[in-house]
Image (cartoon, rainbow, N blue to C red):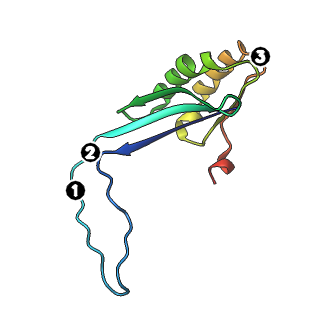
């Protein structure tokens, strides 16, 4: 089983919550400019306990980019019979993506692709 996920962090992350005495307002300065964002995408093999195909990038994750990473970086590392679990991000659930996965899965016997397990996101 392989879990696939992506995440990102910014150089300067502003706090969204804070604490003050009851009845007092919390004022925290927030910069008005955008900062560089770094994204990471990878798979985690439950069987081998290894990170698979990690990639660090600074652009937004799109459906096209995800499928390039998925098809050319992750899938070649998977063994036949691998179950692939994805979260419910919108770029995972595209008809074109499912077709690419189906084409690749036909070359990997018993390779399964599960894209609608939002219950796992909890």
Q: CA distance from mark 3 to mark 1?
A: 52 Å
Q: In the image, residue 114 lies at what x, y percent?
A: 69, 34
Residue with the most extreme top position: 107
Q: Residues within 10 Å of mark 2 (few under 14, many from 20)?
A: few
Which quadrant holds the C terminus? bottom right
Residue with the most extreme front position: 49
Q: Residues within 10 Å of mark 1 (few under 14, many from 20)?
A: few
Q: In the image, residue 90 lies at what x, y percent?
A: 54, 40
Q: In the image, residue 118 lies at what x, y percent?
A: 65, 47
Contact between labelled residues 1 and 2, with CB atoms less than 8 Å apart: yes
Ranked by sequence position, the earlier of labels 3 and 1 is 1
The answer to whether residue 23 is above or below residue 39 is below
Q: CA distance from mark 3 to mark 2?
A: 44 Å
> What's the mark number on residue 16?
none
Residue behind mark 1: 31
Could you say whether the residue bearing mark 3 is in a helix, strand or loop?
A: loop
**Residue appearing at x 26%, y 72% in the figure:** 27
Could you say whether the residue bearing mark 2 is in a helix, strand or loop?
A: loop
Ranked by sequence position, the earlier of labels 3 and 2 is 2
Residue behind mark 3: 109
Quadrant of the image occupied by residue 24: bottom left
Could you say whether the residue bearing mark 1 is in a helix, strand or loop?
A: loop
Q: In the image, residue 84 lies at what x, y percent?
A: 67, 31
Which quadrant holds the N terminus? top right
> What's the mark number on residue 35?
2
């Amino acid at each position: 089983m392989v879990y696939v996920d992506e995440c990102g962090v910014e150089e300067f992350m502003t706090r969204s919550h804070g604490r003050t005495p009851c009845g007092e307002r919390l004022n925290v300065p927030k910069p008005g400019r955008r900062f560089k964002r770094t994204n990471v995408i990878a798979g985690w093999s439950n069987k081998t306990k290894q990170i698979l195909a990690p990639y660090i990038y600074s652009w937004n994750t799109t459906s096209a980019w995800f499928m390039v990473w998925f098809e050319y970086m992750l899938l070649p590392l998977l063994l036949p019979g691998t179950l692939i679990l994805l979260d419910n991000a919108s770029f995972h659930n595209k008809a074109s993506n499912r077709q690419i996965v189906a084409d690749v899965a036909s070359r990997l016997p018993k390779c399964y692709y599960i894209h609608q397990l939002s219950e796992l996101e909890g």
